[in-house]
Image (cartoon, rainbow, N blue to C red):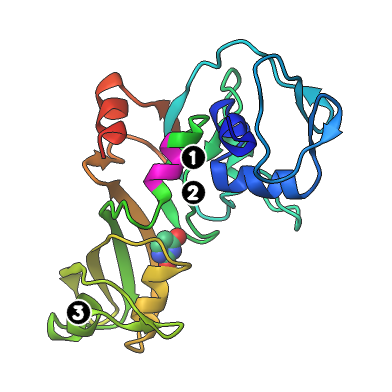
Amino acid sequence: MRINKFLADKGVASRRHADSIIEAGRVTINGVVATLGVSVEEGDVVAVDGQVLSAAEKKEEYYIMNKPKGVVCTVSDDRGRKTVMDLLPEGVGRVFPVGRLDYATEGLLILTNDGDLAFRLTHPTTEIPKTYMARIEGTLTEKDLNPIRSGVELDGILTKKCKAHIVETNKAYTKVHITITEGRNRQVRRMFESIGKNVEFLKRVSIGQLKLTGLDRGQMRPLTEQEIAYLKGL
Ligand code: URA
């Protein structure tokens, strides 16, 4: 088995993040620093940062969190900011966030140690609809949303067609429900910036049929068997 898949299966990191851990020289196989693409054979002793990974079957864990703003979606932050890891209650294993929400964005975040599921859910070809509630400064009309619906250029590449509709509008702000199937950097904020609008509040409310309902800011709960089966079927 490839070393990055092995690390993902053990819940060390997503397959992509595993590559960077390997490249950083933090992984050894039988005491020898591993390189990208090498294979792990049965009986090999694999260690990360000198810590040997147990051969025992890993128990997979899946959680849904209502990420508050002011928290980063990484396992550690070089600027010393609070991370979602700081919000994990006692007893939660070595899970990591699936995909990212910006520092200033709140809402639905999945955390797991199932590297394969994380890989599939964040892969660009999977195209899972993710719905956000965006509060935009000032008034907007349905017509103003048309460029966003049909695709705007970000970094020279058009965004995919998406759904957007106004939930509430007044002189001060407009609330928009927007559903995108991509996960580009700061995508929703930049889509509105491209039509000259500022997103002053952004919250992810669903991923596919999985909804945030019932979770207060900063709270998390294990996903149910049905929710896990649903995500695995996406
Ligand atoms: N779009 C954004 O702008 N930010 C997020 O965190 C997610 C989607």
Q: What residue type is labelled 1?
A: Gly
- Look at 31% across and 41% down and name the residue there: 212
Q: Please provide percent x and percent y for residue 99.
A: 47, 50
Does residue 198 lie above or below 234 as drawn?
Answer: below
Q: Mark 2 points at which residue?
A: 68
Q: What stretch is highlighted in magenta?
A: 117-121
Q: How crowded is mark 2: few (under 14 residues within 10 Å), some or many (20 or more)?
A: many
Residue 96, above or below 135:
above
Q: Which residue is drawn at 34% across and 62% down?
A: 182
Task: Decide if ligand 1 comes within 8 Å of the CB at mark 3.
Answer: no
Q: Position of residue 106 (x, y in %)?
A: 44, 53
To which residue does mark 3 refer?
Answer: 150
| Residue 17 is a magenta residue | no
Evaluate if marks 2 and 1 touch, with contact meaning CB atoms under 8 Å apart.
yes
Label 3 neighbour load within 10 Å: few <14, some 14-19, many 20+: few
Residue nearest the observer in this picture, 43 or 196:
43
Of residues 77 and 7, which is closer to you in this image?
7
Q: What element carries label 2?
A: loop
Give the total number of marks visible in the rendering. Answer: 3
Residue 129, located in which quarter of the rendered image? bottom left
Q: Can residue 65 be seen in this view?
A: no
Position of 110 with respect to 13 (left or right) is: left
The quarter in which the N terminus is drawn is top right
